[in-house]
Image (cartoon, rainbow, N blue to C red):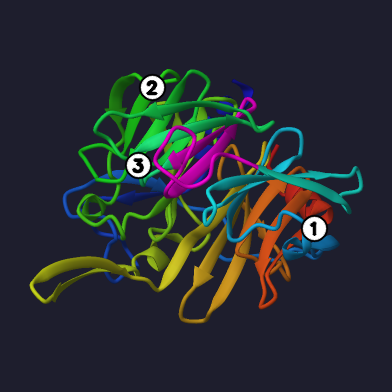
């Protein structure tokens, strides 16, 4: 409860930006639809401030040299013990990497039942989360959630009725699921046995309901077992939820002005109506969340430049950006450690960096 009080105080201290009737002052065209009204908090800082320190490379591991080398890894997640997990979507297997205390050596093994349509098998993994010793694999291909333990044991396959899951987060006593086909609400709430309870969450960008490409987003892990972030890639803001209740909507450091550059495009190709996003700037390209920080990568398509930005996890206050950030396809935070996957011509490399000095700078910027 203490940080909720702090959040409320911080909220009052931030300059609100009122978004009404689809009009945003200073932007050529709103990314919010006409007739929709909400309050979006702006960041106190108006431009990036880069850290004095840089990430320190601890080790680099050539994954293609391992005896059980993965084919194609996607996403990285740490569990609470500091073990690193990834999904090989070409083989339908989960990889786990266990580190030595100095983070310089690893042991690796894979588990799972591979590709297929049966229990424990996967066909198209669209998301995975780790919660209380379990791994939840969202299989959008067969419309199920496959559950394993972090020790490699298969538990169960969970179906969500006629709903095809796309994204998921796990709360203390429920599952929050986004579906492949948009509906009137953003999220569906299930109990941990797979029983549907109700739907909730309004589209902050109404056009996203009809345009799944434009509505592309991430859904964070839960923290404190009940809070999670909804992270649209293209809009310039994120939303924080307390279970089924919207706590706040807040701009990224790039903000709605950058998000408004990503305009929806409708094309008629051989009689087929195709909806897509004309992407100029991803305000949330990727994220990783730990108990204190939310690390977000933004990407500028025109400049071909990416940024690593650090926010306070509980308030989404922008703190600073990482100087000379690592090149990576995916990353994950664990304390002051950040793991990254780097794709090279030879194959995939796993790099481990110490972000301690950067986080020390970030910590000094958190308001008490």
Of helix, strand and loop, which one carries label 2?
loop
Q: In terms of sequence position, does the residue under pointer 1 or pointer 3 come before the other?
A: 3
| Mark 3 crowdedness (10 Å alpha carbons): few <14, some 14-19, many ≥20 | some
| Mark 1 crowdedness (10 Å alpha carbons): few <14, some 14-19, many ≥20 | many
Q: In terms of sequence position, does the residue under pointer 3 or pointer 2 come before the other?
A: 3
Q: Residue 158 falls in which quadrant of the image? A: top left
Q: Residue furthest left?
A: 271
Residue 261 is situated, as x and y percent measured from the top left of the image, at: 35, 71
Q: Give the number of the mark in front: 1 or 2.
A: 2
Up the image or down, 14 lies above or below 347; here it is: above
Can residue 220 be seen here? The reply is no
Instruction: Measure the C-alpha gap from mark 1 to mark 3.
Output: 37 Å
Position of residue 112 in the picture relative to residue 34 (left or right): right
Q: Residue at x 74, y 40 (%)?
A: 83
Position of residue 21 in the picture relative to residue 195 (left or right): left
| Residue range corresponding to the magenta coloring | 111-138
Q: Give the number of the mark in front: 3 or 2.
A: 3
Residue 37 is situated, as x and y percent measured from the top left of the image, at: 25, 45
Q: Which residue is mark 2?
A: 194
How many labels were placed on the picture? 3
Q: Which residue is mark 3?
A: 142
Q: Residue at x 42, y 42 (%)?
A: 139
Q: Residue at x 44, y 48 (%)?
A: 126
Q: Which residue is mark 1?
A: 353
Marks 1 and 3 in Cβ contact (< 8 Å): no
Residue 306 is situated, as x and y percent measured from the top left of the image, at: 58, 70
């Amino acid at each position: 409860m203490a940080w909720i009080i702090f959040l409320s105080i911080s909220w009052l201290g931030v300059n609100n930006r009122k978004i009404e009737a689809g009009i945003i002052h200073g932007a050529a065209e709103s990314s919010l639809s006409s007739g929709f009204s909400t309050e979006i908090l702006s960041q106190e800082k108006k431009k990036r401030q880069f850290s004095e320190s840089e990430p320190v490379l601890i080790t680099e591991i050539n994954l293609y040299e391992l005896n059980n080398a993965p084919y194609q890894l996607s996403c990285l997640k740490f569990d609470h013990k500091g073990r690193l997990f990834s999904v090989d979507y070409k083989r339908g297997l989960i990889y786990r990497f266990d580190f030595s205390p100095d983070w310089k050596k690893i042991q690796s093994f894979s588990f799972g039942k591979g590709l297929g349509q049966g229990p424990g098998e996967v066909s198209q993994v669209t998301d995975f989360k780790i919660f209380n010793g379990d791994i939840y694999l969202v299989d959008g291909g067969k419309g199920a959630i496959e559950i394993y333990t972090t020790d490699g044991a298969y538990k169960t396959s969970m179906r969500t009725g006629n709903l095809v899951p796309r994204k998921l987060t796990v709360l203390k006593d429920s599952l929050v699921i986004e579906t492949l086909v948009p509906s009137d609400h953003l999220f569906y709430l299930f109990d941990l046995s797979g029983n549907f309870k109700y739907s909730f969450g309004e589209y902050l960008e109404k056009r996203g309901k009809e345009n799944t490409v434009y509505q592309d987003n991430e859904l964070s892990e839960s923290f404190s077992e009940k809070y999670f972030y909804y992270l649209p890639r293209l809009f310039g803001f994120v939303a924080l939820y307390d279970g089924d209740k919207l706590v706040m909507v807040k701009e990224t450091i790039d903000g709605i002005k950058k998000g408004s550059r990503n305009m929806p495009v409708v094309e008629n190709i051989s009689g087929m109506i195709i909806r897509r996003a004309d992407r100029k700037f991803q305000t949330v390209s990727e994220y990783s969340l730990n108990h204190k920080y939310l690390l977000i990568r933004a990407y500028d398509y025109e400049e071909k430049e990416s940024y690593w930005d650090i926010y306070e996890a509980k308030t989404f206050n922008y703190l600073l950006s990482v100087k000379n950030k690592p090149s990576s396809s995916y990353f994950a935070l664990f304390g002051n450690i950040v793991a990254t996957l780097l794709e090279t011509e030879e194959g995939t490399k796993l790099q481990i960096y110490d972000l301690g000095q950067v986080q020390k700078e970030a910590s000094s910027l958190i308001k008490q």
